[in-house]
Image: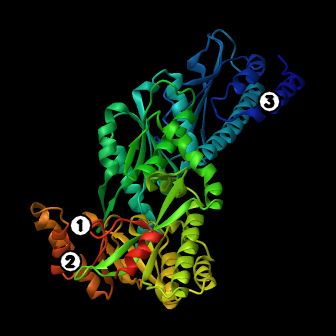
Amino acid sequence: MDFDYARYVTLMNEFSNTCGKIRTFRDPEIKRSIVPLCEFLRIAAFEVTVDSANSSSHKPLVQPFFYYFKGTADRKRALKIDETIYDGSVAHYNILPSFGEPDWSEQELEQIRALEKQVAMHSERGYIMKLAEEKGRIDETLEIYLLPYFFEYIGRVMAEGKLDKYGAVYFNLKRFSLVNEYFSRRVADDIMRSYIRGLERSVKGDKCICRVGGDNFVMLYEKADLDAVVEYLLGKKVKLNGIEVNVSATAGYCTITEGVRKPTDVMDRISETIQMARTVYKKPYAFYDPKMAEQKKRMKEIENIFPEAIKNEEFKVYYQPKVRIEDGKIIGAEALCRWVRNGSIVPPMQFIPVLERSSSICVLDFYMLEHVCCDIRRWLDEGRKVVKVSVNLSRMHLGSEMLLENILGIIDRHGVPHEYLEIELTETSADVDFDELKNIVNGLHESNVSTAVDDFGTGFSSLKLITELPWGVLKIDKSFIPEDSDEHSKREKILRHIITMSHDLGMECIAEGVETLDQARLLHQMECYLAQGFYYAKPMPCEDYEKNLMCE
């Protein structure tokens, strides 16, 4: 029987044209387009088995995949061809004739081999595209999936009707930029990889950990593993090549219940929750609560009315005296913000965390500095007694190239001598660029504007932060001051060391939150000579503060 080359060429061209859509050796497009050629070449079955070179990513295909199967194949007369694929995997092609059919002619065998080459070529092209697509979904540094896979995984679980078995968490590794800074990027990557692998091992059930970017991650886990996840993220010691680092995370959890209709709903909930944990609750973790929606609404209202409140000068400066413990003499004051709206005072905890979510806090800080400078200038002009006033500055300002210029510009515009101002930076928000912090503290120091570390001991107590910058004042947080005699043993030791350290570093030391005479006496015995707290005076309006100064 003569071989019909014209018919063969037509069918092969049609097959080649349709194979442009192929993305993997399993692509159904191959099966559809290969049928006419298999029938023409008297092929009863065309199958492939793939042995993967990377079984961790692509499991070996043990069962044959049939591009074509007529059901009457003669396996004893199979034509077997092996092809090595891009990554070292091997594709075993088996092409079988039908039972009872004559053997293939030489012309048919030649064209069958050509067909196999076409299939192999297009399959490998699709295989490479699939690998490239997979590579784009994986964080190569940590060897885990990126965020898009998180949505895909949730979608798959939803399709199986099993989402109610799971919980989700969005977590951020605390102050990991400092690990990068202290060691190196490569070492920090190794530490992060070890920490994430430890998390994977600590969770027994199904899980999916994906990197959002930087030191931010999301995770889906079975509800039975919640305690293990919470415990791990609260802090684990990572030991690696002689290095030992404590790594912990801020986390927002969501126990998935009704109301989740799409994967992005889960992401929205955990993103919202971690923000609440950071800015509102100021805790290492929080759980999603439907009431958060109401809180979020109130926060949005505050953000919306803030510009109007600033314009109307609803924010008032309250002064809390700082005193010398020995004689109770006022030696300074801290300027604190109070929002008076519709005749009532809005508690700072209701609006400060909200404003810290955006640049609004920077606007408020400069507003406070302006008003403090106005008061000091007026006191000087009126011949009143003037003592140094400290103004709080959010570290949200750091990163602004104009920060130092803006601070000094406000002070100088009001003609206030620099020695009457002090800038307080809260130690609890120490996850900032050290060089930026260094620039502003050095700049203020050179301009004779004192700087203070506020709430020392409640956040990241970095010795580098304290020893390498020219701080003028160290403010000890009230949590270190014993409230009664039963607490004295441990707290006294810590307190005594902090006071001694501040003196050794040439820093003035002041204790915050002093509420009793016993506390004041204890501090004085430990050679802490300055204090601030309700025992001496609460924050007060400007007029009351002026009267207190006049009575000195």
Q: Nearer the viewer, mark 1 or mark 3?
A: 1
> Is 151 above or below relative to 421?
above
Q: Residue furthest toward the right?
A: 6
SS category of the residue bearing label 1:
helix
Residue type for callout 3: Thr
Q: Position of residue 147 (x, y in %)?
A: 55, 45
**214 left or right, relative to 23:** left
Badge 2: how crowded within 10 Å, few (<14), some, or many (20+)?
few
Residue type for callout 1: Phe
Q: Which quadrant does the N terminus fall into?
A: top right
| Mark 2 lies on residue | 497
Residue placed most toward the observer, 152 or 140: 152
Residue type for callout 2: His
Q: Does label 1 or label 2 sit earlier along the sequence?
A: 1
Q: CA distance from mark 1 to mark 3?
A: 75 Å
Q: Position of residue 385 (x, y in %)?
A: 43, 85
Q: Does label 1 or label 3 sit earlier along the sequence?
A: 3
Q: Position of residue 406 (x, y in %)?
A: 62, 78
| Mark 1 lies on residue | 480
Q: Nearer the viewer, mark 1 or mark 2?
A: 1
Decide if residue 465 is in sight here: no
**545 left or right, relative to 415:** left
| Mark 3 lies on residue | 18
Asked if labels 2 and 3 touch by Cβ distance under 8 angstroms, the answer is no
SS category of the residue bearing label 2:
helix
Residue occupying the point 39% across, 53% down: 249
Badge 3: how crowded within 10 Å, few (<14), some, or many (20+)?
some
Q: Does label 3 or label 2 sit earlier along the sequence?
A: 3
